[in-house]
Image (cartoon, rainbow, N blue to C red):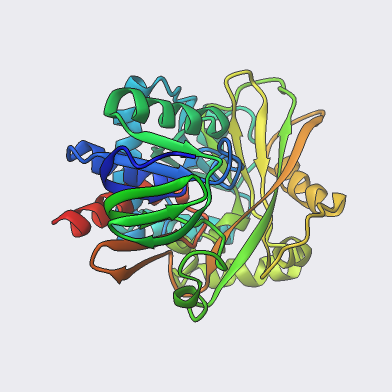
Amino acid sequence: MHSVTETFDLAIIGAGICGLAHALAASRLGKRVIVIDRDAQANGASIRNFGFVTVTGQQRGEGWRRAMRSRDVWAELAPVAGIEIVHRGLVVAARRAEACEVLEAFRATEMGEACELLDPAAARARFPLLNDVAGALYSPHELRVESRTAIPRLAGFLAEAHGVVFRRGVSVHTVEPPTIVTSGGTIHADAAVVCPGDDFTGLFRERLQDCRLTRCKLHMMRLAPIGGSVDAGIMSDLGLVRYLGYAVLPEAQALRERLEDEQAEHLANGVHLIVVRSADGSLVVGDSHHYAATPDPFAPESVDELILDEMRAVLAVDEVRVIERWTGTYASADDRLALIDRPSDAVRLVLITSGTGASTSFAIAEEVIADLFG
């Protein structure tokens, strides 16, 4: 049991990337922060992802702006927190003429100003692992970290450099600042931010029940190193009808119709391709999307094969050896990218509902903390 020996400016419930981002934003303002989490270490969606901070393709406006800002925070933070940026940039490989039309339309928007359109020859010359493609878009904005090490290192940096206090293996029962009642005793904090991830039945469940929330399960794999290098994230046509920055463009409709005819099974399983490299040369590859209030824990091989099928269509790889598989779940909503609620003047409830925690949490946290302490 932890006795009440300290009073904090802010208590954060949840030590995933969303909670850590709020801890960073508050501690940068000089606030005394405690982070409380029921798990002994990071174990949820924040480490079960690509670690790919994706800007290009995020929803136009607020989503894209938040991703740009969060990318900047990652770039500032990584060197001082001992977090390696494994590679930068994104290549969207277009397999079809219709995909090229989407990329051309995207490049003409304000979001595409720093991006480059590559013809087939230029795409292959710059990225030799690509198969024959109809064209490609290169974005310089993205960066990639290894989530399973970056999240613990970020927490360690917050503790060491900013004095953030962590209480792990502790459940929170009630949040009524200045009183936070936990399984480890009572904590005093002037304000609180609750970041419950995809837990909709715990704290503030009555406020979440009408928010059209569900959970999304995804499949991911790690592949043994292959010949050649992958020095940027890689996406393909399937991503152009899923990421809203592309998918809402009028030009995306023709691509969607062709994909429905040619890759209906991929679409039915929510498959789109992301490939990123790790420092040891292995590749993290995914993913798929299946929605349910309680997703089942099973990972059919057939879904993994759909993902690998798309990768083989994009990359010239002779042999694929899967060395690790996992699933993850995250909060999802069809009408918003994030949920930011205000249960009281001293409490904020924050969920990332679009699978973009690594890409948008730092910017969202800055907004929430400015509002809370403004």
In the depicted structure, whether residue 3 falls above or below residue 191: above
* Residue 357 appears anywhere in the view: yes
Residue in the foreground of this view, choosing between 267 and 45: 45
The residue lying furthest to the right in this view is: 301
Residue in the image at 32% along x and 21% along y: 80
Residue in the image at 75% along x and 30% along y: 317
Residue in the foreground of this view, choosing between 129 and 182: 182
Image check: 308 left or right of 231? right
Q: Tell me residue 330's x, y (percent).
A: 58, 57
* Residue 68 appears anywhere in the view: no
Q: Tell me residue 92's x, y (percent).
A: 53, 46
Image check: 345 left or right of 205? left
Q: Quadrant of the C terminus?
A: bottom left
In the depicted structure, whether residue 50 falls above or below residue 172: above
Residue in the foreground of this view, choosing between 51 and 94: 51
Q: Tell me residue 8's x, y (percent).
A: 26, 44
Residue in the image at 52% along x and 50% along y: 183
Q: Tell me residue 126's x, y (percent).
A: 51, 28
Q: Quadrant of residue 72?
A: top left
